[in-house]
């Protein structure tokens, strides 16, 4: 079982009173922890559903498949046996690059994004990364707040990095591209705990 993946199910039957009768009802009580596990190809249907619901410019299935096949760190966060989000990261030498971090738009603001980000940081540290970088839209206030609260700082800006032609700004006469902020955070790569890179 993958590190950090907790999962318990308790099924039981109970006698309950129903009027004068005593009937046996089956109760399935579930205690299912939130956990992360490596993404598999079978997850892609749900992953794409989340991706399309969360981004104006979602990744295609082909991009996710390429990430899986390339052996990038691809993790899903499950809660109550249902995928609620995912993170994708490439580790190259001493640098970890977060390529995607996304939580189901119905479940945002519940701490899942922070959880996935911290998990990616642990994996990066396990691979001796010294640094984690990522790009984020300046308009993505929620993501920026999350990254800054986890120790990221801006180290650069990539001009006209993202498409923007569906945005309100563009429709009001703005640019059809949006810059990316490049954020970086030191990673404690000296710890050396080894986690699998992502493929199950
Ligand atoms: C950005 C994203 C990953 C954050 O995940 P999340 O599960 O919603 O965030 P969390 O509940 O873990 O919150 C972590 C922190 O993010 C910030 N945050 C989250 N939602 C916020 C909001 N609506 N406005 C401002 N800050 C917000 C807060 O600092 C929060 O910490 P706090 O709860 O202690 O105040 C998620 O909103 C998402 O998937 N967005 C769409 C995809 C995306 O933009 N990904 C990032 C690409 S760079």
Image (spheres, rainbow, N blue to C red):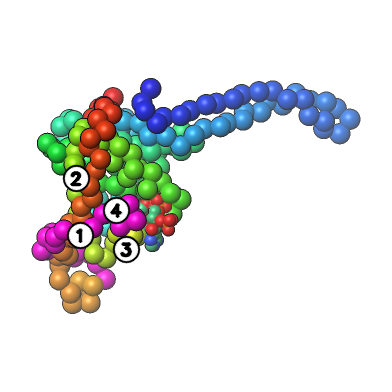
Query: In the rendered structure, does residue 197 fall within the stretch colored magenta?
Result: no
- Could you say where residue 108 lies in the image, as x and y percent from the top left? 42, 52
In the rendered view, would you say 26 is above or below 65?
above
Q: Is mark 3 within 8 Å of ligand 1?
A: yes
In the image, 45 versus 155, the foreground residue is 155
How packed is label 4: few (under 14 Cα within 10 Å), some, or many (20 or more)? few
| Residue pointed to by mark 1 | 154
In the rendered view, would you say 64 is above or below 143?
above
| Residue pointed to by mark 3 | 141
Q: Nearer the viewer, mark 1 or mark 3?
A: 1
Q: Disc 1, disc 4: CB below 8 Å?
A: no
Q: Disc 3, disc 2: CB below 8 Å?
A: no
- For the record, the magenta segment spans 146-168
How packed is label 1: few (under 14 Cα within 10 Å), some, or many (20 or more)? some
- Could you say where residue 64 lies in the image, as x and y percent from the top left? 22, 39
Mark 1 → mark 4, Cα distance in angstroms: 10 Å
Residue at 20% x, 52% y: name it.
184
Residue at 85% x, 27% y: name it.
21
Say what secondary structure mark 1 lies in. Answer: strand
Mark 4 → mark 3, Cα distance in angstroms: 16 Å
Residue 131: image tag: 2
Say what secondary structure mark 4 lies in. Answer: loop
Query: Mark 3 or mark 2, which has the lower sequence index?
Result: 2
Residue 151: image tag: 4
């Amino acid at each position: 079982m993958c590190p950090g993946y907790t999962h318990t199910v308790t099924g039981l039957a109970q006698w309950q009173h129903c009027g004068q009768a005593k009937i046996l009802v089956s109760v399935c009580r579930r205690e299912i922890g939130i956990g992360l596990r490596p993404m598999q190809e079978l997850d892609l249907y749900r992953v794409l559903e989340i991706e399309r619901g969360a981004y104006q410019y979602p990744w295609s299935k082909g991009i996710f498949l390429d990430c899986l096949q390339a052996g990038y760190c691809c993790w899903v966060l499950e809660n109550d046996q249902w995928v609620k989000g995912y993170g994708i990261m490439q580790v190259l030498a001493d640098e970890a690059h977060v390529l995607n971090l996304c939580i189901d738009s119905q479940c945002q603001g519940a701490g899942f994004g922070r959880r996935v980000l911290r998990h990616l940081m642990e994996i990066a540290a396990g691979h001796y990364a010294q640094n984690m970088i990522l790009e984020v839209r300046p308009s993505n206030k929620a993501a920026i707040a999350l990254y800054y609260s986890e120790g990221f700082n801006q180290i650069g800006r990539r001009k006209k990095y993202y498409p923007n032609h569906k945005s309100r700004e563009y429709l009001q006469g703005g640019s059809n591209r949006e810059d990316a902020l490049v954020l970086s955070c030191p990673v404690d790569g000296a710890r050396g705990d080894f986690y699998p890179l992502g493929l199950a």
